[in-house]
Amino acid sequence: MKDIQVRNQVKQLRLAQGNMTQNDLAKQVGVTRQTMHLIENNKYNPTIRVCLLIAKALNTSIDQLFWMEESI
């Protein structure tokens, strides 16, 4: 059976915004900095609502931010 994991590039896109910190993004989205840290490090899968808010804050789409990877 294949293991499916959600991956993201939130950190890369956040850093591309210039001086945006984890805390800045977390405040815009309505989560804690710790939650944002977990999301960026693929340790926590956010709700669709949080995904949409992150995409909006980073001026991108969900499919640019998140994708699924299958491992054997």
Image (cartoon, rainbow, N blue to C red):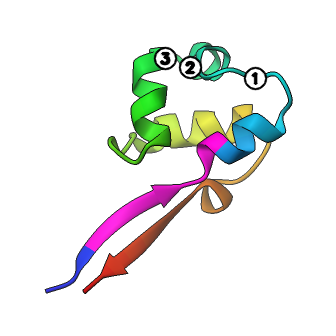
55 and 23: which one is in front?
23
Q: Are marks 3 and 2 in contact (CB under 8 Å)?
A: yes
Q: Quadrant of the C terminus?
A: bottom left
Mark 3–mark 2 distance (CA, rounded to whole Å): 5 Å
Name which residue lies at 75% across and 23% down. 20
Quarter assignment of residue 43: top left
49 and 41: which one is in front?
41
- Does residue 45 sit above or below 72 in this rendering? above
Name which residue lies at 67% across and 15% down. 24
Q: Are marks 1 and 3 in contact (CB under 8 Å)?
A: no
Sequence order check, earlier mark of 3 and 2: 2
As drawn, the label of residue 50 is: none
Judge left or right: residue 69 versus residue 66: left
Judge left or right: residue 27 versus residue 48: right
Residue picked out by circle 3: 33
Q: Residues within 10 Å of mark 3 (few under 14, many from 20)?
A: some
Magenta-tinted stretch: 4-11
| Amino acid type, mark 1 | Met
**Residue 60 position within the rendered picture, expressed as x and y whole percent measured from the top left:** 76, 49
Mark 2–mark 1 distance (CA, rounded to whole Å): 10 Å
Q: Are marks 2 and 1 in contact (CB under 8 Å)?
A: no
Q: Quadrant of the N terminus?
A: bottom left
Q: Nearer the viewer, mark 3 or mark 2?
A: 3
Residue picked out by circle 2: 26
Asked which secondary structure carries label 2, the reply is helix
Q: Is residue 18 magenta?
A: no
